[in-house]
Image (tube, grey):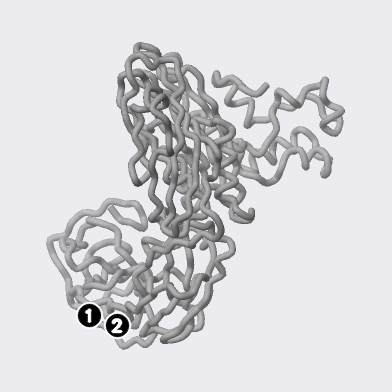
């Protein structure tokens, strides 16, 4: 199929290679120039680049999309094609006719040179100080810091903004990156990138911002997910440390008496912070409690009280769920000590599943790893759960969904969204004094209305089976509820009485129940 027009093409038996395609000199970084000639000039003739080890359009038919391309419209000329997103290696360029795959010349093989320099962190500096080198200096070369588990330009393309950065313009040099916004003890990845873009100049390196001050746990006590008597249990708490100097902290049970052994002797704590064991069959309807101690590489220690609710054999593992919808606000990055504050908030709320908004850059992964939970990370929304996700559904605009197993034969479908934010309906009424008809038009303009209609369309299959597999829907809808905007409450809403806000009305009309009102 034609990757530009979407049309299928018929393979041709006659191959015309009367034209020419050759490499042309270039002195521009991440650009390969080609000279071409053909007697079949066409404004939609093009030159496409493919991996040399793939078939490409060898048979003059579509096999895969090109990696990079440009039009070559004249009888002869020179075309410059970007190689910025191509890793070092060998490639093949094809001169092709009329946005299709008919050859106009024999393909040419060429190499993308290795621009590799180096990047390293100086261990003798408590700040993030990097040594770097590159054969391709440029005033806009830069070093960017990202979460180690997401958000960085792993494919040499923009995914999300860096957490912090600094220019690295020289052939060899040293640069300090402001680390004040980075969270102590968390893992990050540093990328040395070209010309204000995302082309690697060196292999990225993983770093940890060392903590300062005493080693502590983010919370004083932690309640894990439920265990069942007589069945294996496992939980992880290594991510709950605050201010670790490095990832080398060790964990163990705190001191306890012989009497304590009878109540929590079944629970073991590994050196890397994994709690495991099998509660005795007689331990149902109890809470196992014990202290875990962490030992930092500098000799400092910290303690946390761990509680494991144990249900009897034959009873459901989960009888009640606590659900939280949480907009992180740019992942939380504008807030001092945002990581510890977010973990503390979720833990103290006793949440079991959290629908996250503004989690771009891997923040759902960050929180889940800290708490030992499962996760799904989307472009903006994310979902974290103390119970395992057994299926992740294909995301749709501004929304994602997963299936979570609470127990054997007990599952839920969990949806989470973050709808468009502007124009904002209450402002339309109260500040711009728009009519209800105009506000409804703006709800469409904001994309909230088409987004919620599309979400409910995709959710319909789950809703039809909700008596067997319950459906939970969280989100930041960026709109009020029609259940609040009533005639009785018009004095609270700029004298506007009942208004059918689409973002709340469509879900309820589809069969969902508002759990808040």
| Secondary structure under the numbered disc 1 in the rendered image | strand
Q: Which mark is residue 35?
A: 2
Residue 268, x across and y down, in percent: 34, 34
Q: Which mark is residue 178?
A: none
Q: Quadrant of the C terminus?
A: top right
- Name the foreground residue: 200 vs 240: 240
User: CA gap, disc 2 to disc 1?
Assistant: 8 Å
User: To which quarter of the image does residue 500 belong?
Assistant: top right
Query: Is 174 rendered above or below residue 426?
Result: below
Mark 1, Cα crowd under 10 Å, few <14 / some 14-19 / many 20+, is some
Query: Is 289 rendered above or below residue 115?
Result: above
Residue 426, x across and y down, in percent: 76, 38
Mark 2, Cα crowd under 10 Å, few <14 / some 14-19 / many 20+, is some
Which residue is outermost to the top?
314
Residue 299, x across and y down, in percent: 44, 56
The structure residue drawn at horizontal position 34% and vertical position 86%, both measured from the top left corner, is: 26
Q: Which mark is residue 20?
A: 1
- Name the foreground residue: 144 vs 418: 144
Residue 355, x across and y down, in percent: 53, 36
Which of discs 2 and 1 lies nearer the camera? The answer is: 2
The structure residue drawn at horizontal position 44% and vertical position 61%, both measured from the top left corner, is: 208
The answer to whether mark 2 and mark 1 are in CB contact below 8 A is: yes
- Name the foreground residue: 283 vs 49: 283
Is residue 204 at least partly visible in the picture? yes
Q: Is residue 423 left or right of residue 402?
A: right
Q: Is residue 253 left or right of residue 34?
A: right
First of labels 2, 1 by sequence position: 1
| Secondary structure under the numbered disc 2 in the rendered image | strand
Query: Is 504 rendered above or below residue 156?
Result: above
The structure residue drawn at horizontal position 51% and vertical position 23%, both measured from the top left corner, is: 321
User: To which quarter of the image does residue 233 belong?
Assistant: top left
């Amino acid at each position: 199929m034609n990757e530009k027009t979407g049309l299928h093409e018929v393979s041709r038996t006659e191959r015309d290679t009367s034209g020419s395609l050759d490499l042309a000199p270039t002195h521009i970084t991440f650009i390969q120039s080609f000279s071409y000639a053909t007697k079949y000039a066409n404004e939609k003739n093009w030159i496409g680049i493919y991996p040399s080890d793939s078939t490409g359009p060898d048979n003059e038919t579509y096999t895969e999309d090109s990696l990079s391309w440009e039009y070559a419209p004249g009888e002869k000329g020179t075309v410059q094609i970007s190689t910025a997103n191509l890793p070092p290696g060998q490639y093949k360029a094809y001169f092709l006719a009329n946005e299709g795959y008919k050859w106009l010349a024999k393909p040419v093989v060429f190499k993308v040179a290795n621009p590799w320099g180096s990047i390293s962190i100086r261990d003798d500096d408590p700040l993030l100080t990097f040594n770097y080198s590159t054969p391709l200096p440029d005033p806009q070369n830069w070093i960017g810091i990202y979460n180690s588990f997401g958000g960085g330009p792993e494919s040499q393309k923009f995914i999300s903004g860096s957490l912090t950065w600094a220019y690295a313009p020289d052939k060899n040099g040293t640069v300090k990156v402001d680390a004040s916004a980075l969270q102590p003890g968390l893992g990050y990845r540093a990328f040395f990138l070209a010309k204000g873009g995302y082309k690697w100049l060196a292999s990225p390196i993983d770093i940890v911002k060392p903590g300062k001050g005493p080693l502590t746990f983010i919370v004083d006590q932690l309640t894990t997910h439920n265990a069942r008597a007589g069945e294996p249990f496992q939980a992880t708490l290594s991510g709950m440390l605050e201010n670790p100097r490095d990832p080398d902290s060790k964990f163990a049970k705190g001191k306890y008496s012989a009497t304590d052994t009878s109540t929590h002797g079944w629970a073991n704590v590994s050196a890397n912070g994994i709690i495991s064991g099998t509660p005795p069959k007689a331990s149902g309807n109890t809470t196992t409690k014990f202290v875990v101690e962490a030992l930092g590489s500098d000799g400092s220690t910290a303690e946390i009280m761990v509680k494991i609710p144990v249900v009897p054999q034959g009873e459901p593992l989960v009888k009640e769920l606590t659900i939280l919808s949480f907009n992180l606000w740019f992942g939380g990055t504008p807030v001092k000590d945002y990581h510890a504050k977010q973990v503390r908030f979720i833990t103290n709320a006793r949440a079991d599943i959290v629908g996250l908004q503004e989690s771009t850059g891997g923040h759902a992964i960050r929180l889940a790893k800290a708490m030992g939970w499962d996760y799904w990370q989307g472009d903006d929304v994310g979902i974290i759960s103390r119970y395992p996700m057994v299926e992740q559904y294909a995301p749709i605009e501004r929304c994602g969904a997963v299936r979570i197993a609470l127990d054997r034969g007990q599952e839920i479908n969990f949806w989470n969204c973050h709808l468009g934010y502007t124009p904002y309906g209450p402002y339309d009424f109260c500040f711009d004094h728009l009519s209800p008809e105009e506000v409804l038009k703006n709800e469409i303009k904001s994309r909230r209305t088409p987004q919620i209609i599309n979400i409910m369309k995709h959710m319909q299959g789950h809703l039809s089976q909700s008596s067997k597999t319950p459906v939970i829907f969280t989100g930041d809808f960026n709109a009020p509820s029609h259940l609040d905007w009533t005639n009785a409450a018009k004095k609270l809403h700029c004298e506007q009485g009942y208004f059918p806000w689409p973002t709340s009305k469509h879900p309820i009309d589809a069969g969902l129940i508002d759990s808040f009102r």
